[in-house]
Amino acid sequence: MQDLLVATRKGLFILPPARHGWQLLRPHFPGEPVTQVLRDAADGTLYAALRLGHFGVKLKRSTDGGASWQEVASPAFPPKPTEGPWKDDPTPWTVDMVWSLEAGGGRLWAGALPAGLFVSTDRGESWQLVESLWNRPERKEWFGGGYDLAGIHSILVDPRDPDHVTIAISCAGVWQTRDAGRSWRNTSEGFDAGAYMPPERRFDGNIQDVHRLAACAAQPDTIWAQHHCGLYRSLDGGEHWQAIAAPAPSGFGFAVAAHPADPERAWFVPAHSDAQRVPVDGQMVVTETRDGGRTFASLAYGLPPRDAYHLVYRHGLACSADGRMLAMGSTTGGLWFSEDEGGLWHCLSRDLPPIAQVRIA
């Protein structure tokens, strides 16, 4: 059984396996906001991104399971140009937060707020801004979704070809590279932003607010998306997207987890709506499809049945590598897990700091 990694506003919790679920221990970096945590499957190295406000973004690395930590380089933009097409760019060229962190093919990828993508080939000792994405003229139209600025929250590294990377930006849709970041294409065909854009722009790929992407590990051409306006799935590696009819109780939400072996299965955590970001009727549920989105079941046994006002953000739902364990953390400090694919949920804590991410690794 793997560890449960929980990044919170007041520290990083590394929960070792216990007889029943995981054991809750004292946090690393107590009192400090941790926005992302990653365990690189290639060598077991842990990375934690901290958002320290006035002191900036910091990146920590551990090679001994968290017993000790070393500060390494943090992603950083170059100085803003004083001439040329970007001299009047209203977007600050300062990393406010590392919003996504993934590894693959000997590279680390970091998605930032604002929406810069960074890559490291030396385990975080140095970072390079992917200028081919940052300097695209389309970026002048990108805008915030959840934050005032556009940000990169989802990074999928194709396990068959690490040069193939898919990212999602709120709000700028889905972008892909097949040459390790030298060139990019927007692949948002099928998304519909009609709930927040005028009719003439509802299908514009450059303004789509995709909340989260998750791919099936065994069949990575199957990608699930939680969009601001509902649920979607792609069967061709994110080239095209098909809408899924909104399940009860809601199609709005942020988190999605894909089953690692079964491309027909995925889990979502619904909220009432954009205007009411709480569970419908105060009852917390997870919705699951086992047939590619044609039908859904609500999984609620063990979750708060009433007076629950938790919200699960983009990185707050995770599935284990064998597909049996699920973990879920909320912005109000609730942490649950299931040992049977969501059939029964157990509460680890209701008193943690706001949870930014859970990862089983």
Image (tube, rainbow, N blue to C red):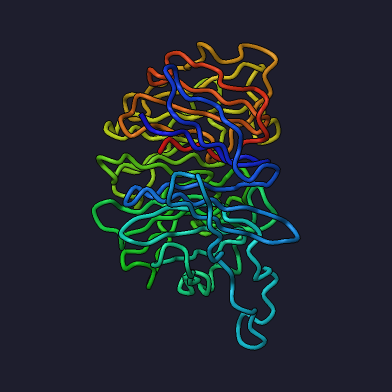
* Residue 49 place in picture, x, y as percent: 57, 53
Q: Report if residue 230 is visible in the image.
A: no
Q: Residue at x 63, y 59 (%)?
A: 57
Q: Residue at x 66, y 12 (%)?
A: 306
Work out whether residue 274 or residue 8 is closer to the camera in this orientation and state it. Answer: 8
Work out whether residue 341 or residue 17 is closer to the camera in this orientation and state it. Answer: 17
Q: Report if residue 299 is visible in the image.
A: yes
> What is the tally of numbered marks visible in this picture?
0
Relative side of 254 to 240, left or right: right
Q: Residue at x 50, y 37 (%)?
A: 5
Q: Is residue 243 above or below residue 34?
A: above
Q: Quadrant of residue 89?
A: bottom right
Q: For the C terminus, which image quadrant?
A: top left
Work out whether residue 261 or residue 36 is closer to the camera in this orientation and state it. Answer: 36
Q: Residue furthest right?
A: 54
Q: Quadrant of residue 341?
A: top left
Q: Quadrant of residue 271?
A: top right
* Residue 9 place in picture, x, y as percent: 67, 41
* Residue 274 place in picture, x, y as percent: 66, 36
* Residue 213 place in picture, x, y as percent: 44, 44
Q: For the N terminus, which image quadrant?
A: top left
Relative side of 344 to 304, left or right: left
Q: Residue at x 66, y 68 (%)?
A: 94
Q: Is residue 295 above or below residue 112?
A: above
